[in-house]
Image (spheres, rainbow, N blue to C red):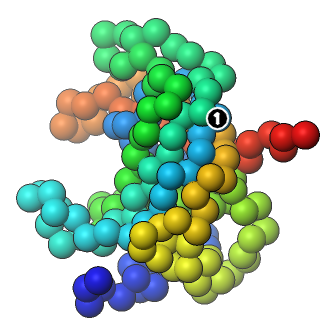
Amino acid sequence: MSDINWADAMKGLGSATQSGGSNFFGPGEYLAEVVSITRKISSDPKKRGAPMIIAELRVVEALVARAATANHPPSNATGEVCAVIVNLAGAYPSLELGKLKGILQAILGAEAATTDDEWIALATQVTEPPGQMLAGQRLIVRGTPKPTPTKGGFYITTLTFAPAPVSE
């Protein structure tokens, strides 16, 4: 892949908390299914070379749908694949790591790991390209629209993640 030390890039994962944002999931609550969760190197000109983790999640069902507003899109449609990007070289590493930890906790349980080293080892294992280890696993994605724009003038939807109900 590259000479990125992924364990170093994920330092702090054990103490991370959920509160990250994404421009890809619209406001609403969704039952989602993992398509892939994998490590990539950014090719975006603004972030070129930055280590990232991309979680691709397919909307199985919009549990709480919202209409579009002037600042936010409508809820995502059933079948739509949405990305949650974890920029490991971002300006707010604890927020970025919180997205990854939230996804892992929703799928594997809050006690899947306890120490930073255990979380890093787990994340390194499940994000090994092509990122199929957790494919098909389900979780709840809650998108809450932020009422104020970012410094760049963009309105975002903050995401939190929870375990999916167990099917009978």
Camera-nearest residue between 157 and 137: 137
Camera-nearest residue between 139 and 137: 137
Amino acid identity at mark 1: Leu
Q: Is residue 27 left or right of residue 160?
A: left
Residue 51 versus residue 54 in the image, above or below? below
Which residue appears at 63% of the width and 19% of the height? Answer: 64
Sort mark 1 into few (<14), some (14-19) or many (20+) by Cα contacts within 10 Å. many
Which residue appears at 56% of the width and 51% of the height? Answer: 34
Residue 13 x, y percent position in the rendering: 54, 72
Outermost residue toward the right in this view: 168
Residue 152 x, y percent position in the rendering: 19, 37
Q: Is residue 98 left or right of residue 23?
A: right
Residue 30 x, y percent position in the rendering: 60, 31
Residue 64 versus residue 106 in the image, above or below? above
Outermost residue toward the left in this view: 45
Residue wearing tag 1:
31
